[in-house]
Amino acid sequence: MLLTHKLKLLPNEEQKNALMEVVERFNGACNFVAAAAFRIRSANKIRLQKEVYYAVRERYGLPAQMAIRAIAKVCEAYKRDKGRKPQFNKYGAVVYDQRILSWKGHDLVSLVTLSGRTVIPFLSCDHYEARNGIIRGQADLIFKNRVFYLCVAVEVPESETIEPIDALGVDLGIVNLAVDSDGGTRSGVEACKFRGRVAKLRSGLQSCGTRSAKRHLKKLSGKEKRFQRDINHCISKHIVAKAKDTKRSIVLEDLGGVRSQETVNKAQRRDLNTWGFFQLRSFIEYKAKLAGVPVVFVDPKNTSRICPRCGHVYKENRKTRGDFECVRCGFAGPADHVAATNIAARGRVNGPIVTGDLFGPMDHLGRKPTNSFVSG
Ligand SMILES: [Zn+2]
């Protein structure tokens, strides 16, 4: 499986300046090439190279291979949307391929700059699993919050898929980040407390409005994200290990199009709750794949309203956000656990699949199920 791996570069002052020069010139060149591509209405690499290669090298002082990469980047962007001229941010990503980048052992990388090659130390700061993988293909040099990173694709070996004998349903949410059908809960309380503290600090800084306050605000959001990411790594690891140890598949609600965080729109992405929710889902998915645990997606309809004992579906079954109590048979329990139980039941290969509606419960063959509740 290919994972994206972010490496934090640790350049000295001189190297920092050299990298900055590369970033600015590369993106300047991209905008120059974009103008040419738009003018001649061509996203053909060979054609564009003929048109602008020498001009790019002369004007921006880029090494040969870097000029080629800039042209290639513009072609890709222009191909995606031929209606308008592609725009490149001043600090956009610089593409490094194997000709202008080489790895020196585990913690050094050699990069071509405008004044020759330079060897820079780096730290791993992403996916724990990726550290033992094999780096493939190109790398992106990124400049973000005054730090240089290299984003690389890493090939990580997958385990053989297990043959599940049962299903572990997982209900993901905001208050309780994850509740499984065994009743295991990871609450969002820690995350909430942390956010509460951050929110206080933030409102103070926002009313301040100075440049340094803005910088602090940015730092805070980075801290929050790292905190949430750690929690999500931890929860997903735990869930996947539990499923694997007990030979169960993991069952999640199928959210249709919005399955990964990439598909969430910008406004939503800014909301850390939503962001964290989708990140946790994607962490569970990729860790499960690596561990060879099958993930099953099921219809999310009524998972929090249906009674796992008698199959009665009714809005009033859910008394409050946290409590479930069946109005027909009196079955009661924590709402998230009930939802996780229902999710697991839907994912069980041979078990009854409850697809009840207001007219009464039925299984997938249209029969009345006897008892779909399996206690954890
Ligand atoms: Zn009931």
Image: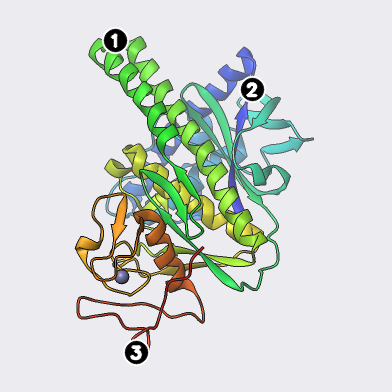
Q: Residue at x 32, y 23 (%)?
A: 199
SS at mark 3 in the image: loop
Residue 177 position, x and y percent, is 42, 46
Going by the picture, which residue comes out furthest to the right? Answer: 105
Q: Which residue in the structure is indicated by mark 1?
A: 210
Q: Nearer the viewer, mark 2 or mark 3?
A: 3
SS at mark 2 in the image: loop
Contact check, label 3 and label 1, Cβ < 8 Å: no
- Crowding near pointer 1: few (<14 within 10 Å), some, many (20+)? few
Judge whether 189 appears above or below 298 on screen.
above
Q: Quadrant of residue 97?
A: top right
Q: Quadrant of the N terminus?
A: bottom right
Q: Nearer the viewer, residue 285 or 242?
A: 242
- Distance Cα–Cα, label 2 vs label 1: 29 Å
Q: Which residue in the structure is indicated by mark 3?
A: 367
- Distance Cα–Cα, label 2 vs label 3: 64 Å
